[in-house]
Amino acid sequence: MIESIHDRTAFIRANTALLPSPLVPEVRLHLATEAVPLWQLTEEALQEKGLPPPFWAFAWAGGQALARYILDNPEVVQGKRVVDFAAGSGLVAVAAAIAGAQSVLAVDVDPFSLAATELNATANKVVVTTRGDDIVGQPLPDTDVLLAGDICYEQPLAGRVEHWFRTLVAAGTPVIMGDPGRTYRPSGGMRRLAHYAVPTTRELEDNDVRSTDVWLFETDQQASAAVEAATEADA
Ligand SMILES: C[S@@+](CC[C@H](N)C(=O)[O-])C[C@H]1O[C@@H](n2cnc3c(N)ncnc32)[C@H](O)[C@@H]1O
């Protein structure tokens, strides 16, 4: 039975392989080689059924694109206090630390994610701190930029998060999200920063490559100015 962070760390070490993430080979992660057996093993180890999939054991397309963008545009995080929201494996957090962030906090409600993120930070020789409570809706006073990879895969989370992100942006904290066109992605109020073709696995996705965007959430004023500019260009 898994009860402590040490148990989770040992479980991750025993059931994953340290591999480069496909679009971000400079970051190595403890990744699952097969999804379903690991999911079953997690349920057995926790003696619980109906658990969410082991998100922490995969480099999701949104996270890979965002990590690639951060490493290719380090000024986005350099010298800044960064939050990686819904960190999963911690890929984006590790990329931000490698790119020169002043500090990186990885947040995820899954305790396995926190253990995986700590292991992955150590494997990449960077420092990332972790936090496991649900911070959606809370102010983030000590944050210069919030990053989020692949969070629009289910409605309740995507809806809560969009509202929260807009509040943070209005209060002056930039929010950047990587998303491979998931169903619950916001339909507007964002500016595309980059686009990538991200290698994925058929175990998770319906394709070997996912077309993935990196988005900057805009303030209401920026969004209306963009609509006006587009209307003028069309006229
Ligand atoms: C699809 S994974 C993405 C992981 C990572 N960002 C990536 O792109 O590889 C979604 C993650 O959201 C986390 N999550 C779900 N609800 C959350 C919440 N309320 N607060 C923080 N993390 C949450 C899950 O535990 C999971 O690790």
Image (cartoon, rainbow, N blue to C red):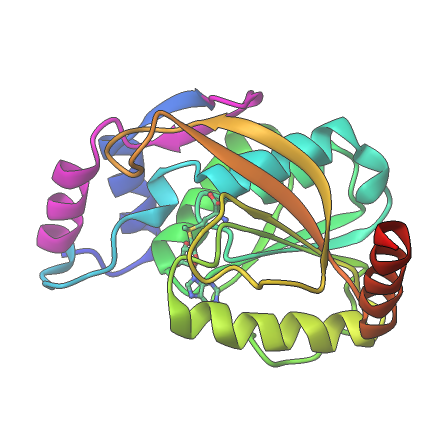
Of residues 81 and 8, the one drawn nearer to the viewer in this rendering:
81
Taking the image as shown, residue 64 lies to the left or right of residue 12, namely: right
Q: How far across and down, in percent of the image, does residue 90 sit?
A: 51, 44
Span highlighted in magenta in the image: 21-45
Of residues 185 and 48, the one drawn nearer to the viewer in this rendering:
185
Q: Give the residue drawn at x 20%, y 56%.
A: 2
Q: How far across and down, in percent of the image, does residue 149 sit?
A: 54, 49
The answer to whether residue 37 is magenta is yes
> Residue 124's quadrant in the figure?
top right
Q: Quadrant of the C terminus?
A: bottom right
Could you tell me if residue 134 is visible in this image?
no
The answer to whether residue 106 is magenta is no
Taking the image as shown, residue 169 lies to the left or right of residue 83, namely: right
Q: Give the residue drawn at x 84%, y 59%.
A: 231
From the viewer's perspective, is residue 52 above or below residue 202? below
Q: In which quarter of the image is ligand 1?
A: bottom left
From the viewer's perspective, is residue 178 above or below residue 69? below
Taking the image as shown, residue 143 lies to the left or right of residue 86, namely: right
Q: In which quarter of the image is the N terminus?
A: bottom left
Taking the image as shown, residue 35 lies to the left or right of residue 44, namely: right
Q: How far across and down, in percent of the image, does residue 102 sit?
A: 81, 47
- Outermost residue on the front side: it is 235
